[in-house]
Amino acid sequence: MTVKDNILCSKSHEYVYTEGEYCFIGLTDYAIEQLGDIVFVELPETGSAYRKGEIFGTIESVKAASEIYMPVSGEIIEINEQLIEHPELLNEKEFDEMWLIKIKADAYEEDSADLLNYDTYKEEVE
C-alpha cells in the first residue's frame, strides 16, 4: 500500500492531508479495521465550521458507532457524497482515497503541530 507523503494522523484515528489550499480529512486504516464492516456515515453540511477536536460526524459499523473528530480547524467545503449512499466503500478502497470531508483550514500549521506522520502513527497503534 502506498500512502500519501504528506498524510498526518491524530491519536483519535483521523487523518489529514493537503492539496493546494485545501485539506482532506478521513479515517485511518487502523480505525477502519477496528470498526469492521461500515454501514452508515453521517457528515456535516458544507459551509459549517469546526474547531480542532470538535466532533464533525459519526460512523457506524456492525460492531460499534464512533464519533469523528476534526484534526485541524476549518470550514467544510465539500463532503464525500458517495459515502452517504455507499459507506461500505470505506472498507473496499485504500483509506487515503476515501476522504470524508474537504476543508479550508484556519490555521493548518499550528493545528497540525501535534499530529503524527503515518509511519509514527502506525508504530504507536501496533
Image: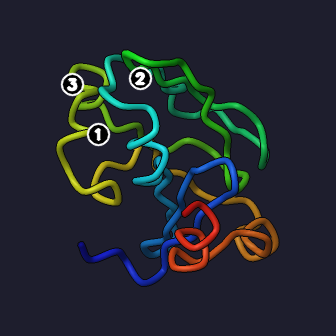
How far is the residue under mark 1 from the one under mark 3?
A: 8 Å
| Label 2 vs 3, first from the N-terminus | 2
Are the residues at dot 2 and dot 3 in contact (C-beta closer than 8 Å)?
no
> In the rendered view of the protein, which quadrant contains the N terminus?
bottom left
Task: Report whether 39 appears left or right of 65.
Answer: left
Task: Report x, y in % for residue 41.
Answer: 41, 23
Are the residues at dot 2 and dot 1 in contact (C-beta closer than 8 Å)?
yes
How far is the residue under mark 2 from the one under mark 1?
A: 10 Å
Q: Quadrant of residue 58?
A: top right
- The residue that label 2 is drawn on is 41
**Residue at point 49%, 44% (across, down):** 31
| Identity, as a three-letter code, of the amino acid under mark 3 | His
Q: Residue furthest bottom?
A: 5
Q: Quadrant of residue 90?
A: top left
- SS for dot 1: helix
Task: Report whether 53 appears left or right of 101.
Answer: right
34 shown above or below 95:
above
Task: Report whether 1 appears left or right of 38.
Answer: left
106 shown above or below 87:
below
29 shown above or below 68:
below
| Identity, as a three-letter code, of the amino acid under mark 1 | Leu
**Residue at point 30%, 26% (across, down):** 37
